[in-house]
Image (cartoon, rainbow, N blue to C red):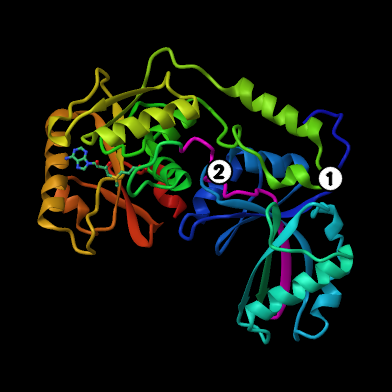
């Protein structure tokens, strides 16, 4: 950080993670030079505005970053609003903004989260001396009462971090951008070798792979809630974005391949790849999995999110499809590695490949497992 940076306040920050992916968010924070502390549902860390901005700009797997404003013991609903009113909410909620509150109570005397949200709103209104509607735009306040201990945080991200701003082309069952990043970063892929997604759908895995290879910050093309806070430092933010732009590299040749049998998927992928600005990295083609062959590179990673079908048990068709994928991979993809997401524990047997399970998380309400032929040190993270 340059010496021109004056605000030395240290904040208590929390990067929210999809359940099961907390270690991966912690690993990402370490890559940013930040010391993480693993917790259920996310990772806490201390930092000033530079760390807060960098976390929002660079984290690929986290869904939002919170800043803790208030913390106190809370045994009764009575008096809660008065305690809340002691904190400087005017720093985070500008006059033209409304309020959204998410409250949870766990193992505490206070158990009614709806009543908690109402009291917190009352307290903030008392402090700001105005009524706050859940209108747009609004700031999100996250309240957690755990073992009678209340913490209240303000969301610094705004829209979920997985909304990178490139999903213009739509398709069925797309993977969220942060889950595609989790598949890639948790797979054991070295973040240098070529990547091929043969079930590309809307292109999420291919685009996230290209963004990693290009050192492209996922948050460069969107806005954040912290830009509306009173402590917002536009010079610092511009500098961090400039640094991020300078870190971006251009490929000497494309090293990501995306294919799918559906013409609609190819169209959506083209639109999204362009919107993400990674068209120089990716070759897109329409192809059935049975015709899949490696592009002209010796080593790479086939990383994909294949169809699961509608049922919890795999249908005959899905098993057959996995069989084709495994067969093509064994026959033609010498020296390649593979990682994929699948809800079925028997996936390695369906594919006829020695895949290790790395971790599991939820995608679209289904528990999916991340399998890899070579998770390497990533396995020890989980
Ligand atoms: C679960 S979706 C992938 C979603 C994608 N990860 C995304 O974020 O949009 C599975 C994709 O596999 C494609 N697919 C199904 N059978 C295929 C086959 N035999 N060959 C190639 N693609 C196939 C479908 O068209 C669909 O786009």
Residue under pointer 2: 28
Label at residue 231: 1
Horizontal side of 333 relative to 375 (left or right) equals left
Residue at 55 percent of width and 43 percent of height: 28
Distance from mark 1 CB to nearest ligand 1 atom below 8 Å:
no
User: Marks 1 and 2: in contact by CB < 8 Å?
Assistant: no
- Quick one: 308 or 172, which is closer to the camera? 172
Taking the image as drawn, is residue 158 in sight?
yes
Give the extent of the magenta segment. 148-167
Residue at 78 percent of width and 69 percent of height: 71
Compared to 55, does 15 lie above or below? below
Location of residue 250 in the rendering, given as x and y in whole percent from the top left corner: 49, 17
Horizontal side of 285 relative to 66 (left or right) equals left
Taking the image as drawn, is residue 191 in sight?
no
Q: Main secondary structure of the magenta part?
A: loop
Location of residue 284 in the rendering, given as x and y in whole percent from the top left corner: 31, 25
Location of residue 46 in the rendering, given as x and y in whole percent from the top left corner: 73, 51
Compared to 190, does 163 lie above or below? below
Horizontal side of 321 relative to 43 (left or right) equals left
Task: Report crowding for label 1: few under 14, some 14 to 19, many 20 or more residues within 10 A (C-alpha).
Answer: few
Query: Magenta stretch: residue 209 in it?
Result: no
Q: Examine the image and state in which quarter residue 126 appears.
A: bottom right
Q: Quadrant of the N terminus?
A: top right
């Amino acid at each position: 950080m340059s010496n021109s940076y004056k605000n030395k306040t240290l904040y208590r920050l929390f990067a929210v993670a999809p359940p099961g992916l907390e270690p991966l968010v912690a690993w990402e924070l370490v890559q940013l030079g930040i010391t993480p502390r693993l917790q259920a549902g996310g990772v806490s860390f201390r930092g000033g505005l530079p760390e807060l901005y960098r976390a929002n700009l660079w984290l690929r797997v986290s869904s939002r970053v919170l800043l803790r404003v208030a913390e106190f013991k809370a045994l009764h609903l009575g008096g809660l609003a008065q305690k809340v009113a002691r904190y400087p909410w005017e720093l985070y909620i500008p006059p033209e903004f409304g309020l959204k509150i998410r409250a949870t109570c766990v193992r505490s005397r206070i158990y009614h989260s709806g009543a908690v949200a109402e009291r917190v709103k009352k307290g903030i209104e008392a402090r700001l001396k105005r009524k706050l509607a859940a209108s747009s735009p609004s700031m999100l306040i996250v309240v957690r009462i755990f073992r009678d201990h209340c913490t209240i945080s303000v969301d610094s991200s705004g829209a979920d971090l997985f909304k990178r701003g490139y999903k213009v082309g739509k398709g069925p069952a797309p993977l969220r951008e942060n889950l595609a990043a989790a598949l890639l970063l948790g797979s054991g892929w070295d973040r240098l070798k070529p990547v091929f997604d043969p079930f590309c759908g809307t292109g999420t895995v291919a685009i996230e792979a290209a963004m990693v290879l290009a050192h492209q910050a996922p948050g460069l093309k969107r806005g954040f809630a912290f830009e509306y806070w009173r402590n917002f430092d536009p010079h610092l933010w511009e500098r961090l974005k400039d640094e991020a732009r300078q870190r971006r590299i251009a490929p000497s040749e494309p090293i990501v391949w995306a294919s799918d049998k559906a013409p609609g998927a190819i169209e959506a992928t083209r639109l999204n790849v362009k919107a993400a600005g990674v068209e120089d990295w990716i070759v897109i083609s329409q192809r059935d999995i049975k015709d899949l062959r490696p592009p002209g590179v010796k080593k790479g990673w086939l990383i994909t999110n294949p169809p699961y079908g509608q049922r919890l048990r795999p249908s005959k068709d899905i098993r057959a499809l996995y069989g084709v994928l495994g067969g093509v991979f064994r026959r033609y993809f010498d020296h390649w590695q593979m990682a994929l997401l699948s809800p079925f524990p028997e996936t390695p047997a369906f594919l006829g490949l020695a895949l290790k399970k790395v971790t599991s998380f939820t995608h679209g309400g289904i528990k999916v497992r991340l399998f890899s032929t070579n998770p390497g040190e990533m396995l020890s993270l989980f």
